[in-house]
């Protein structure tokens, strides 16, 4: 059963382009549809500006969608109030320096989601906070510190504790290890994997680091200019990427293998601009194998066996 | 062959904090030397100390520090300023903060040449256009009149590189030049650096935390930990037979696509880097090292590991019976 079902999600932003010019519409998230089975991890990858963080904000309720729907455990997500949504979905963000209130004790930061519900006694809150701090590997003494007194890895543990203290079903991890050193990144990824297994959590894991996504995700969605252009089980996607963009992304990963040089990704110098989405296939200006049809006709999603999806005329 | 850049026993302190502790570094002509380590290990401070750009309160000393035969330690500030941006130039991680937002790309690029070589503005702008073309910037003539905020991140970094090449430097110091960029753009920039190295005979000191980059571009590697160079080796050698427990731990932390075992945890290094006060003795990694023994609290020898490969550790290779990271 799906923990979360997102259907035809869309979000437009209006961008003022000048005093007399007409406003532009930037479609940051365009007709995004996916489901994540309970206990699964959906990895979302793509370059900056592809809409992956906007997607996270929509699901978290930090932005309202222009259209589309989302079901979490059968409940219509966008109809829920903040408290009910907070009990189902919680975030872990990239920068643990920016996402923790610098003027509060760590234990108060972690307690805030409980206190905001207004239904827990003080004793209950203290007990739950102590349990979750221990679970993420922070000592009780760390709870009495300020965020500035913690290392980057410890802060990210505190952010994870805050996300889990309400026992949500789904955690949205938006670049959770990008600001961390590699040795600390490995600690946090291992912790997230343990917590998912032990608590039966479902993750939506957003990252630009494909190696990390391959390690944590059971399924991967590749976003390009607001659309999911390919979606598949992780192993299949990494072994047989079908969309030329997925192929280019995978080719650009620099594995620690000496002597192989830096690959020519072949994406050219034109960078995608969300305010000027090309006609036809939105990827065609950077695509190595684009043909005439790609310049005029937008490819429809092709769904194959096992739910794998790709949007490409030539895949 | 004499090294282009030769640093021996560099010490940098900021008050009570020892940021660099006896680091030695040699960059040969025409090589890409990677200085790798995690945040706070002293890799950027080493480069800044070399260029005499330490922040206020920073103090440097070294047994030797030469660039192309010039003694940098005794060089007056004004003479150093003539070398910086001229014979050695640098690019930094975030091009938005190192470009001046109030000046056009053209005037910032031209200034490098008019200032260092006394060139005319017109000649400097011609050179800027030529170099922008060389680093793959389309429509360079138009870019001259643009401001940094009008360029994408990848373009800004290309402008920084073109600017760094204005005076035909011998050494390019690149501090995390692709960390703020997308992976696709990162590959383009690194390819560009590699081709410039071949074309101009550049030596590159590349500072990074990314072992994937190191593996793909480095000729030689120095691994830093807590202010010390704990291991140095030719790149292929370092990845084939890493010796220092920190290097080995670091390599096991990196997920490698295609070799992923989701059912198994990633390797990780427990704990965090200790704060190092002046006068710290012994191995700085010992509190996180699975092989630490009592002697690690004392002076640590530099052990040869064949050829140009050596490492800073008490333990002999055979004393460490642990599997190679997969």
Image (cartoon, rainbow, N blue to C red):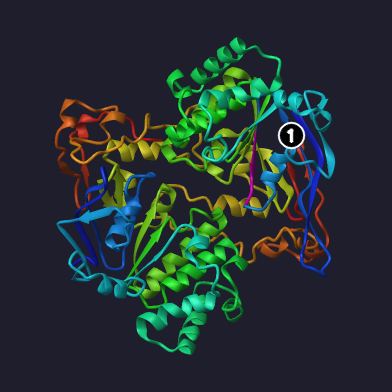
Q: Position of residue B222 (x, y in %)?
A: 29, 51
Quarter the N terminus of chain A occupies: top right
Instruction: Identify the subunit bearing mark 1.
Output: A
Residue at 27% in and 45% down: B227
In this rendering, does residue B261 appear at all? no
In this rendering, does residue A294 appear at all? yes
Task: Name the residue at the front extreme.
Answer: A103
Which is more toward the observer, B323 or B52?
A: B52
Residue B326 falls within the magenta-colored stretch: no
Q: Position of residue A157 (x, y in %)?
A: 51, 29
Residues in magenta, as a range: A42-47
Which is more toward the observer, B67 or B248?
A: B67
Q: Position of residue A295 (x, y in %)?
A: 78, 65
Residue A43 falls within the magenta-colored stretch: yes
Which quadrant would residue A81 be assigned to in this image?
A: top right
User: Tag count in the figure?
Assistant: 1
Which quadrant would residue A42 be assigned to in this image?
A: top right
User: Where A42 falls versus B202 (above or below)?
Assistant: above
Q: Position of residue B205 (x, y in %)?
A: 34, 60
Residue at 81% in and 33% down: A78
Q: Sort mark 1 into few (<14), some (14-19) or many (20+) by Cα contacts within 10 Å.
A: few
User: Where A284 falls versus B285 (above or below)?
Assistant: below
Residue at 43% in and 65% down: B193
Q: Is B51 placed left or right of B188 in the picture? A: left
Judged from the image, the secondary structure of the residue bearing numbered disc 1 is helix
In this figure, which residue is indicated by the disc labeled 1? Answer: A306
Q: Is B160 placed left or right of A292 in the picture? A: left
Q: What secondary structure do most residues of the magenta stretch adopt?
A: strand
Which is more toward the observer, A5 or B83?
A: B83
């Amino acid at each position: 059963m799906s923990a979360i079902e997102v259907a035809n999600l869309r979000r437009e932003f209006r961008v003022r382009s000048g005093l007399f010019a007409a406003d532009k519409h930037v479609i940051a998230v365009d007709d995004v549809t996916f489901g994540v089975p309970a206990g699964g991890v959906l990895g979302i990858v793509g370059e900056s500006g592809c809409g992956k963080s906007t997607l996270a904000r929509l699901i978290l309720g930090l932005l309202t969608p222009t259209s589309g729907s989302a079901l979490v455990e059968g409940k219509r997500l966008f109809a829920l109030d903040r408290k009910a949504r907070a009990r189902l979905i919680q975030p872990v963000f990239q920068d643990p320096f920016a996402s923790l209130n610098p003027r509060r004790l760590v234990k108060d930061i972690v307690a805030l989601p409980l206190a905001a519900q207004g239904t827990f006694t003080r004793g209950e809150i203290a007990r739950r906070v102590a349990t979750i701090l221990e679970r993420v590997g922070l000592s009780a003494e760390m709870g009495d510190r300020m965020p500035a007194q913690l290392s980057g890895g410890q802060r990210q543990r505190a952010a994870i504790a805050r996300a889990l203290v309400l026992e949500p079903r789904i955690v949205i991890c938006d670049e959770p290890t990008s600001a961390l050193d590699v040795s600390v990144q490995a600690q946090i990824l291992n912790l997230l994997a343990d917590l998912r297994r032990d608590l039966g959590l479902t993750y939506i894991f957003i990252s630009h680091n494909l190696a990390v996504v391959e390690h944590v995700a059971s399924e991967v969605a590749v976003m390009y200019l607001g659309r999911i252009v390919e979606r598949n089980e992780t192993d299949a996607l990494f072994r047989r990427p079908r969309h030329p963009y997925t192929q280019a992304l995978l080719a650009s990963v620099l594995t620690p293998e000496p002597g192989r040089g830096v690959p020519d990704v072949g994406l050219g110098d034109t960078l995608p601009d969300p305010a000027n989405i090309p006609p036809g296939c939105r990827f065609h200006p950077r695509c190595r194998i684009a043909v005439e049809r790609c310049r005029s006709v937008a490819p429809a999603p092709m769904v194959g066996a096992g739910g794998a999806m790709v949007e490409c005329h030539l895949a | 062959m004499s090294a282009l850049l030769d640093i021996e026993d560099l010490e940098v302190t900021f008050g009570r904090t020892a940021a660099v502790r006896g680091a030695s570094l040699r960059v040969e002509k025409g090589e890409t030397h990677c200085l790798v380590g995690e945040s706070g290990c002293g890799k950027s401070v080493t480069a800044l100390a070399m260029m005499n750009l330490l922040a206020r309160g920073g103090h440097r000393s070294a047994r030797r520090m030469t660039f192309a035969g010039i003694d940098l330690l005794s060089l007056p500030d004004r003479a150093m300023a003539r070398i910086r941006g001229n014979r050695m130039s640098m690019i930094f991680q975030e091009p938005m903060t190192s470009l001046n937002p109030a000046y056009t790309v053209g005037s910032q690029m031209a200034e490098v040449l008019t200032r260092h070589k006394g060139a005319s503005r017109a000649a400097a702008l011609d050179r800027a256009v030529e170099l922008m073309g060389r680093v793959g910037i389309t429509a360079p003539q138009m870019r001259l009149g643009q401001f940094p905020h009008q360029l994408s991140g990848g373009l800004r970094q290309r402008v920084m590189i073109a600017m760094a090449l204005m005076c035909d430097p011998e050494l390019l110091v690149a501090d995390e030049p692709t960390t703020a960029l997308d992976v696709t753009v990162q590959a383009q920039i690194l390819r560009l650096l590699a081709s410039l190295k071949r074309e101009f005979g550049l030596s590159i000191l590349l500072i990074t935390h990314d072992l994937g980059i190191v593996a793909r571009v480095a000729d030689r590697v120095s691994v830093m930990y807590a202010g010390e160079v704990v291991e140095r080796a030719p790149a292929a050698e370092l990845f084939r037979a890493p010796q220092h427990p920190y290097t080995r731990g670091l390599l096991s932390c990196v997920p490698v696509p295609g070799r992923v075992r989701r059912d198994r945890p990633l390797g990780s290094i427990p704990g965090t880097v200790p704060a190092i006060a002046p006068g710290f003795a012994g191995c700085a990694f010992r509190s996180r090292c699975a092989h630490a023994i009592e002697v690690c609290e004392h002076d640590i020898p530099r052990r040869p590991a064949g050829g140009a490969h050596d490492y800073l550790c008490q333990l002999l290779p055979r004393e460490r019976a642990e599997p190679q990271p997969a």
